[in-house]
Image (tube, rainbow, N blue to C red):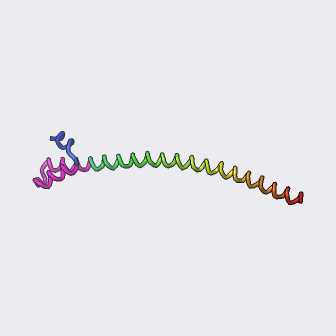
Amino acid sequence: MLNSIHDKTKGQILDEMASSPRTGERINEVEKAAISVKCSEDIVNALTSLEAQLKLNSDSSDRVGNKIFWLNIVLAIATAVGAAATVFIAIKT
């Protein structure tokens, strides 16, 4: 009995419960528990997937942040060189 429930989807279990209402019977309680377990497993799987995706996004964000930092350093140096060249040209003329 339990293996037959284990192999079924939540929808199949719900269909069986709806087609033959056996309120209060042990099988009905087992079916309710099976649906709860399957829903909990789905939630755990979704959270695990979300956690993995958040880790990938965090790593990607760190790499982009690092590249932007070094780009700002290069731009600051280029700005300083341009300012020094402008001052040099202004003094020379």
Kindly give the residue lying farthest to the front in the view shown: 93
Residue beneath the point at 70% across and 53% down: 75
User: Above or below — where is 2 with respect to 86?
Assistant: above
Residue beneath the point at 31% across and 46% down: 41
Span colored in magenta: 10-37
Tally of numbered tags? 0
**How far from the left and from the top, in percent, is residue 74?**
69, 50
Quarter of image, res 18: bottom left
Query: Is 88 situated left or right of 46 in this image?
Result: right
Q: Nearer the viewer, residue 18 or 58?
A: 58
Q: Nearer the viewer, residue 6 or 69?
A: 69
Is residue 50 inside the magenta stretch? no
For the N terminus, give its image quadrant. top left
**How far from the left and from the top, in percent, is residue 39?**
28, 50
Is residue 21 inside the magenta stretch? yes
For the C terminus, give its image quadrant. bottom right
Q: Nearer the viewer, residue 39 or 89?
A: 89
User: Above or below — where is 3 with respect to 68?
Assistant: above
**How far from the left and from the top, in percent, is residue 9?**
22, 47
User: Above or below — where is 80 with respect to 5?
Assistant: below
Kindly give the residue lying farthest to the top in the view shown: 3
Residue beneath the point at 52% across and 46% down: 59
Quarter of image, res 19: bottom left
Majority SS type along the magenta span = helix
Query: Is 82 situated left or right of 42 in this image?
Result: right
Query: Is 92 situated left or right of 58 in this image?
Result: right
Residue beneath the point at 18% across and 47% down: 30
Query: Is 86 situated left or right of 20 in this image?
Result: right
